[in-house]
Amino acid sequence: MVKRRMPVAIGMVAMTLVCCLWGPIPRLTFLLCCGLAATWETWHILSGRHWAYGAVLLLFVAACGLLSFLGSQPLWFVAAFLAALHLILAIGALIYREGQGQEALRALTALAYPGSLFGALLFISQLDHWLWPFAVGQLTAWICDSAALIVGKKWGKHHLPTSVSPHKTMEGCVAGAAAALPTGLLCWALFRSACPLSLWAWMLLCLICSSWGQLGDLAASLVKRAVGAKDFSNLLGPHGGVMDKFDSMVFSIPLAYFCLRIMGVM
């Protein structure tokens, strides 16, 4: 399994880095495609039955991409979210039949997760200092997941007190969080000439984002376990779907952005 997953993982990391560093348009295009795929995957496993809900969700993510490209303020993101919310509820009211109506609740779930989360990524990706939150969020997600997987498989004995993700262990989670510390050192070495944060601030930021990213992984597991699915899709073969690879980053990158804003960097 590891041998089959490794080439796919390396290819995905390489493609992500190339698209993100290539320029704002390739970066936005890549994230938009990932957002559309992840939103559709989530809607699909939630057993959506009416095409109108899926159309609204995909249009919302596409609108976020367009607004990001036009340089719109975050207020437009809120407006797009509310418009999609109104449309979903209106569609639910129009097509409702006795004993039905669960589709609207599923659509609202997909709108909040992962629609709005990817919408936030699209806006952040077009900021002047987009690299800082993306570096912190992506590096912590990648390194944390790898460290948690390796340590959890080899030395994990104490499982998390939740049945949402039965294979995760306390040892793996601690190792994943600890791996964020050298990530903070790496970020400080890369950005210290352009960012006023100290070494300890970078390491603390990476530790916080790493822990929050693990909660994002558990949140994704919650959605999948609720519907009895192992992965969001098989689009990426042994890695599952697009959302399976972004479940940590859609939590860690927005948090990194807000933390950097609070610190006065962004």
Image (spheres, rainbow, N blue to C red):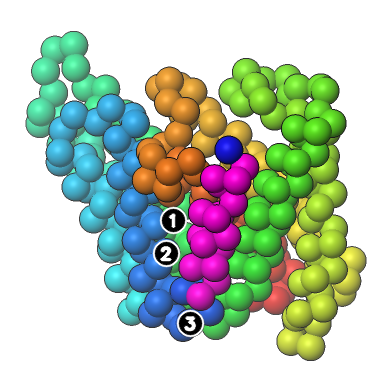
**183 is higher (above) or lower (below) than 82:** below
Q: In terms of image quadrants, where is residue 129? A: bottom right
Task: Tell me the residue that label 1 is attached to.
Answer: 118
Residue sitting nearer the eye, 127 or 136: 136
Q: Residue at x 45, y 34 (%)?
A: 231
- Residue under circle 3? 22
156 relative position to 260: left or right: right
Point 19% across, 47% down: residue: 55
Q: Main secondary structure of the magenta part?
A: helix
CB atoms at circles 3 and 1 under 8 Å apart? Answer: no
Q: From the image, which quarter does the C terminus lie in?
A: bottom right
Secondary structure found at label 1: helix
Q: Position of residue 219 (x, y in %)?
A: 56, 35
Q: Mark 3 or 1 closer to N-term?
A: 3
Q: Residues within 10 Å of mark 3 (few under 14, many from 20)?
A: few
Q: Residue furthest front?
A: 3
Q: Amino acid at mark 1?
A: Phe
Residue designated by label 2: 31
Mark 2 or mark 1, which has the lower sequence index? 2
Residue type at mark 3: give it. Trp
Q: Is residue 200 magenta?
A: no
| Label 3: which secondary element | helix
- Please report the bounds of the magenta region as a residue range: 2-18
In this picture, is 262 found above or below 145? Answer: below
